[in-house]
Image: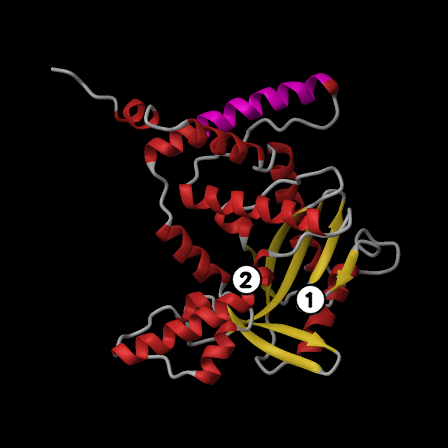
């Protein structure tokens, strides 16, 4: 009786293009050093904003990752003058009707700290978050207030630019849970990709150890990912390179959500109208709300059936 090795059977069917794309994807992963550095900085910011004397001391209910870092889709820098980014959410104990400018300004003050402190000259205020700049990466902290009675972890985030002040519903946790549920890891492909990733990192770490250019972590993160996540990372890398070709050197790459925001709103509107004509129910309210402003648009413009 012949025993068929399903792993070899599947991987032997991969074309040269499949293998080439997998190898490109391996190289867009964060290095073990960068991944560990991102984790350390994430923890450091959390501890910093909760320090004694911080305007947020005793008010931080939850500090959690969001976006690409949460679903494993963060991509490495594509040049020496580019950056990768980490998005986090700080859920604060405040009333739901807090002024958006006050919420954002208070979080920014907690991060910036006093003159001469560690983040004073590294922190930039944005319209919806505060950005901490490091060499080769930046970390965006979004302020949130939990909305009781809604889907798990649904919160208000804030927008403030001059006279334009708004609250926007968001649920990064719900989006990540939904995305991960729809993109399970295929066992054989996962083993294949993980094997190539670890081989690449082993060579990379040996090179770094010889040159003493940066510390080598003891453990590498696991790179067993679904095809969908890898495809998303390849698209993000293509987007960054395409942006660089169209703009002057040194320009910051656009955020993926900003690039597709308008298209998603238009698509949602068409999808809702079509569904309403068919008499169908829509069940993606908490998921589509991840795109800034989209849930607000749905709430005000449509009567969604639960």
Q: Residue at x 26, y 26 (%)?
A: 6
Residue 255, placed above or below residue 149? above
| Residue 268 spot, x, y in % from top left | 43, 71
Q: Residue at x 54, y 33 (%)?
A: 24
Badge 1 density bin: few <14, some 14–19, many ≥20, Cα 10 Å:
some
The disc at residue 30 is none
Residue with the mark numbered 2: 260
Q: Are marks 2 and 1 in contact (CB under 8 Å)?
A: no
Give SS at disc 1: loop
Q: Which of 36 and 68 is in front in this view?
A: 68
Name which quarter of the figure residue 117 lies in: bottom right
Residue 297, placed above or below residue 68? below
Q: Is residue 306 visible?
A: no
Badge 2 density bin: few <14, some 14–19, many ≥20, Cα 10 Å:
few
Q: In which quarter of the image is the N terminus?
A: top left
Give SS at disc 2: helix
Q: Is residue 179 visible?
A: yes
Residue 200, placed above or below residue 168? above
Name which quarter of the figure residue 303 lies in: bottom left
Q: How far apart are marks 2 and 1 (CA)?
A: 33 Å
Q: Which of 211 and 149 is in front in this view?
A: 211
Q: Is the magenta stretch mostly helix, strand or loop?
A: helix
Residue with the mark numbered 1: 56
Tell me where the magenta segment starts and ends, as one range. Answer: 193-210
């Amino acid at each position: 009786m012949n025993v068929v090795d399903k792993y070899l059977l599947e991987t032997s069917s991969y074309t040269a293009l499949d293998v080439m794309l997998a190898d490109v994807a391996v190289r867009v992963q964060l290095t073990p050093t960068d991944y560990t550095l991102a984790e350390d900085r994430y923890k450091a910011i959390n501890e910093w904003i909760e320090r004694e004397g911080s305007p947020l001391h005793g008010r931080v209910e939850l500090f959690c990752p969001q976006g690409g870092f949460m679903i494993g889709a963060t991509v490495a820098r594509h040049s020496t003058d580019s950056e990768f980014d980490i998005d986090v959410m700080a859920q604060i104990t405040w009333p739901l009707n807090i002024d958006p400018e006050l919420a954002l300004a208070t979080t920014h003050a907690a991060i910036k700290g006093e003159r001469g402190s560690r983040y004073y000259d590294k922190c930039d205020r944005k319209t919806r978050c505060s950005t901490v700049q490091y060499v080769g990466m930046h970390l965006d902290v979004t302020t949130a207030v939990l909305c009781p009675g809604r889907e798990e972890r649904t919160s208000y985030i804030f927008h403030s630019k001059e006279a334009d002040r708004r609250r926007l519903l968001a649920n990064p946790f719900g989006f990540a849970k939904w995305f991960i549920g729809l993109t399970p890891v295929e066992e054989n492909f996962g083993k294949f990709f993980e094997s190539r990733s670890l081989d690449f990192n082993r060579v990379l770490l040996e090179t770094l150890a010889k040159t003493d250019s940066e510390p080598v972590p003891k453990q590498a993160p696991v790179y067993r990912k679904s095809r969908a996540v890898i495809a998303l990372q390849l698209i993000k890398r293509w987007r960054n390179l395409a942006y660089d070709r169209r703009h002057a050197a040194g320009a910051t790459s656009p955020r993926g959500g900003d690039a597709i925001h308008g298209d998603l709103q238009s698509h949602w509107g068409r999808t809702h109208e079509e569904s309403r004509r068919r008499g169908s129910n829509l069940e993606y309210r908490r998921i589509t709300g991840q795109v800034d402003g989209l849930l607000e648009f749905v709430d005000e413009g449509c009567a969604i059936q639960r």
